[in-house]
């Protein structure tokens, strides 16, 4: 028997913090796509009521609603990130089995 504390059978406990952070690029991309869908729907429901062609109207709306959607996606990702930082839970890793000698 050894009296060395490093050779004891009790595993060392290491506290670790686990946090689920969002991927900003995917939120921003989803916002741009959502802006494109809204632009398409606006063109679809207002066709024939404008002196501008439908394709030109779509691209004008896309140029304005795309960045707004990206901004909304980035703001959503930021608030999800702040919320996940507040909810970061403390976890312990699984103990490794003792080495056979």
Image (tube, rainbow, N blue to C red):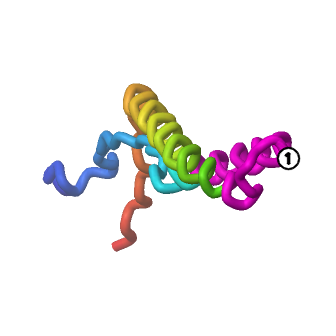
Residue closest to the far front: 51
Residue at 22% from the left image edge and 56% from the top image edge: 7
Dot 1 corresponds to which residue?
A: 48
Is residue 91 shown above or below 4? above
Decide whether residue 35 is among the magenta residues.
yes
Residue closest to the far bottom: 101
Q: Is residue 28 left or right of residue 3?
A: right
Q: Quadrant of residue 53?
A: bottom right
Could you say which is closer to the camera, residue 92 or residue 42? Answer: 42
Does residue 41 appear anywhere in the picture?
yes
Instruction: State the SS at label 1.
Output: loop
Q: Is residue 54 left or right of residue 65?
A: right
Could you say which is closer to the camera, residue 100 or residue 29? Answer: 29
Residue 88: x %, y % from top left: 41, 33
Q: Is residue 5 left or right of residue 60?
A: left
Residue at 41% from the left image edge and 42% from the top image edge: 18
The chief SS type of the magenta part is helix
Residue at 52% from the left image edge and 41% from the top image edge: 68
Residue at 43% from the left image edge and 60% from the top image edge: 97
Residue 40: x %, y % from top left: 75, 50
Residue 62: x %, y % from top left: 61, 52
Does residue 89 appear anywhere in the picture?
no
Is residue 85 shown above or below 38? above
Could you say which is closer to the camera, residue 90 or residue 85? Answer: 85
Could you say which is closer to the camera, residue 67 or residue 6? Answer: 67
- Mark 1: give few (<14), some (14-19) or many (20+) Cα within 10 Å: few
Residue 57: x %, y % from top left: 68, 52
Q: Which residues are magenta?
A: 30-58
Q: Is residue 2 left or right of residue 79?
A: left
Q: Quadrant of the C terminus?
A: bottom left
């Amino acid at each position: 028997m050894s009296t060395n504390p490093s050779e004891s059978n009790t595993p060392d406990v290491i506290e670790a913090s686990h946090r689920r952070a969002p991927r900003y690029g995917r939120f921003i991309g989803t916002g741009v796509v959502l802006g494109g869908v809204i632009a398409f729907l606006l063109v679809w429901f207002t066709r024939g009521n404008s002196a501008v062609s439908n394709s030109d109207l779509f691209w004008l709306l896309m140029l304005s609603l795309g960045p707004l959607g990206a901004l909304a996606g980035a703001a959503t990702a930021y608030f999800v990130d702040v919320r996940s930082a507040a909810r970061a839970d403390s976890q312990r890793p699984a103990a490794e089995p003792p080495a056979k000698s």
